[in-house]
Each structure stands twice: as structure tokens, then as C-alpha cells.
Image (cartoon, helix red, strand yellow):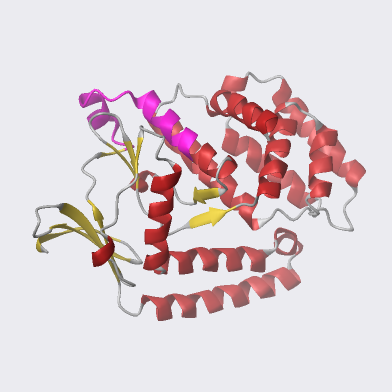
């Protein structure tokens, strides 16, 4: 390769622009030296602190602080596994071969290694640069709908999703195609968990408190010391506040945050994979609120989940 130009730096490594001898424009991601040892040392300290807090503070015990740190560690180790990131990229390309609005970069296999990834260069506009998007004539609402549809399909159809779809990982091409970058952190959910999540979301949408409690029981996340009658009463009170709100006015992240808060207050242990799902969907909602305030995620998500529920 030649004509190497630094593009960006992050804690894991650096990204450069380069042109191969055959004329292809590529991005080159290079891992920092000794980053594994540095992160392992930090994570040991964090886990020790989480263990102390879990033993001494009820709130951290209810949330399962050590399990959260362990999940965080797994995600970080994924980011350091460049061979795994290439596999994730290839899998996403296969999963969304039927999605014309999404571009997943193609890795250059024979140039990738344990500390280097070479892939197609994406020449696009950062998704939050609304002035540039409007200047290019891009349909911003279509962009956010594509992003949300990709996240939903990856979770509920494939059980394999991008955990960190933040604005820096979304670029938009001049024709409105969305490019999703950085496949170092992905998560999986099995078929049973998908069924549970869909049932949970449908129960929320229908203000079905008994349905919610039944799903939590099936998930085996209700502690022995949980007063189910009190849990049901608090969920009923929360859903009653949202029942009168117009669907278009409901903020998904806020709503789900309140549901999770009620669950934790009643010693319901929210599994780490559900937290990752909530994080991914909340990030996507946040991008939509920033670039397209008129986009209403709950209105978009509800019919999709109803269709998935019926299909499954």
C-alpha cells in the first residue's frame, strides 16, 4: 500500500486511509501496541471494585454489578479480536444482502491480520451532519428508518446485532445509502430470548401487566424476595401514566429506562443481553431525535414487532 493518511484515533487503535497498488481505496485499522495488557489490568481493578460494591450496596447487588463488568469485558475483548471483527463484517454482509439501503464494507481478506484490518473505504457524510445531508439532497427520515430497521432485523430476525451503533459508526452516501462501520462489538440472542423480548414488548405496548409479569417469570429473573403483587402494582402505575400519551410522544429510551428501574427496585435481575439490546435501540433512537425530530420510533417499531410476534 502507499499514500497512507491518518484518519482517526481511538483507545483501541488508529484508522488510516490508503490506496493499494491495484488502485483500490481502503481504510486500514491498526491496533495499538500492548493494548491487551493495559485493558486487562484496568478490567481487573474495575471487577474488584464491582465485587466490593455488590457485597456492600443493595442497589449494585440488584443490578448484578459483577455480571455487568464481565459483559463489558467480553465486549472489549471482542473489539481486540480483529479476526472476529472481520468475521462479523462478513456475516453482516450476508445477513443484509437483501437490504439495498445498507452498505457493509468488504474486508480485503489477504491483507487482514490479528492487529490489522483492511477494508473498503467509505466516502460518506457523518449521520449527524444534517446540513451536509440536506445539501446533498438526502432524505433524512429514510436514513433513520433504514438504520432502525437494520437494528430491529439484526436483533429480532437474526439474533446477531451491532452493540455500538453510535453516530461515529454511521455514514451516509450521496444516494442515501447508510454505511454501518466498526463490527468489533456484537452480541447474540438465542431464539428463546427473542420470543421473550417480543412478548415483553407486545405486553408493554398493550399495557398488559399480567403478560409482563408472566414473561419475567418465564425468564427466571424474579428473585425469591420479590413481592410480585407490589411489582404488578408499580408496573400498572407506570403503564397507566403512558397509556394516555399519544404514541408519537413516547420516548422509547425514557420509557424502557423507567420499566427497568421498576424491575430493579423489585430485585428483578435484568440479563446483560437485554441491557445490550436496550442500549443499541436507545442509541438509534437518540440519533433519530437529533437528525429527524419528526421521526417517532415507537410508531415505527410497534407494527414491526406485531408482525414478528405473529410470524414467530
Along the horizontal axis of the image, is 268 left or right of 187? right
Snapshot quadrant of residue 310: top right
**Identity of the residue drawn at 70% across and 59% down:** 63
Viewer-proximal residue among 66 and 116: 116
Along the horizontal axis of the image, is 239 left or right of 133? right
Seen from the viewer's position, the closer of residues 80 and 227 is 80
Q: Quadrant of the N terminus?
A: bottom left
Q: Residue at x 53, y 41 (%)?
A: 281
Quadrant of the image occupied by residue 245: top right
Q: Which span of residues is magenta-colored?
A: 127-150
Q: Position of residue 181 (x, y in %)?
A: 35, 49
Identity of the residue drawn at 92% across and 42% down = 229
Q: Position of residue 298 (x, y in %)?
A: 58, 27
- Is residue 284 positioned above or below 53 on the image? above
SS majority, magenta: helix
Does residue 112 appear left or right of residue 198 in this picture? Answer: left
Q: Describe residue 308's horizontal placement relative to residue 268 as left or right.
A: left
Answer whether residue 134 is magenta in the image: yes
Quarter of the picture holding the C terminus: top right
Q: Residue at x 26, y 29 (%)?
A: 133
Q: How many numbered tags mark residues here?
A: 0
48 vs 212: above or below: below
Residue 270 percent across, percent down from the top left: 70, 53
Residue 2, image x, y percentages: 8, 63
The question of residue 121 being in magenta is answered with no
- Please determine whether, in this image, residue 193 is positioned above or below residue 291: below
Amino acid at each position: 500500500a502507499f499514500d497512507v493518511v491518518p484518519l482517526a484515533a481511538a483507545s483501541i487503535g488508529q484508522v488510516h486511509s490508503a490506496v493499494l497498488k491495484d488502485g483500490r481505496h481502503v481504510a486500514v485499522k491498526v491496533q495499538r501496541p500492548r493494548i491487551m495488557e493495559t485493558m486487562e489490568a484496568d478490567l481487573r481493578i474495575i471487577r474488584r471494585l464491582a465485587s466490593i460494591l455488590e457485597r456492600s450496596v443493595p442497589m449494585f447487588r440488584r443490578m448484578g454489578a459483577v455480571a455487568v463488568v464481565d459483559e463489558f469485558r467480553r465486549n472489549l475483548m471482542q473489539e481486540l479480536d480483529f479476526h472476529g471483527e472481520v468475521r462479523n463484517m462478513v456475516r453482516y454482509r450476508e445477513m443484509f444482502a437483501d437490504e439495498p439501503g445498507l452498505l457493509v464494507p468488504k474486508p480485503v481478506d489477504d491483507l487482514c491480520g490479528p492487529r490489522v484490518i483492511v477494508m473498503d473505504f467509505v466516502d460518506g457524510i457523518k449521520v449527524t451532519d444534517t446540513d451536509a445531508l440536506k445539501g446533498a439532497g438526502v432524505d433524512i427520515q429514510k436514513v433513520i428508518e433504514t438504520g432502525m430497521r437494520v437494528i430491529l432485523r439484526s436483533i429480532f430476525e437474526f439474533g446477531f446485532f451491532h452493540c455500538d451503533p453510535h453516530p461515529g459508526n454511521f455514514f451516509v452516501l450521496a444516494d442515501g445509502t447508510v454505511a454501518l462501520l466498526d463490527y468489533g462489538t456484537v452480541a447474540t440472542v438465542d431464539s428463546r430470548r427473542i420470543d421473550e423480548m417480543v412478548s415483553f414488548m407486545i405486553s408493554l405496548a398493550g399495557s398488559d401487566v399480567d403478560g409482563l409479569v408472566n414473561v419475567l417469570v418465564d425468564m427466571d429473573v424474579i428473585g425469591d424476595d420479590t413481592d410480585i403483587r407490589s411489582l404488578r402494582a408499580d408496573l400498572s402505575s407506570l403503564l397507566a401514566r403512558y397509556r394516555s400519551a399519544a404514541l408519537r410522544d413516547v420516548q422509547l429510551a425514557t420509557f424502557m429506562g423507567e420499566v427497568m428501574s421498576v424491575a430493579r427496585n423489585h430485585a428483578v435481575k435484568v440479563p446483560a443481553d437485554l441491557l445490550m439490546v436496550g442500549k443499541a435501540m436507545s442509541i438509534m433512537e437518540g440519533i433519530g431525535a437529533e437528525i429527524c425530530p419528526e421521526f417517532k420510533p415507537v410508531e415505527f417499531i410497534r407494527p414491526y414487532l406485531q408482525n414478528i410476534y405473529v410470524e414467530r
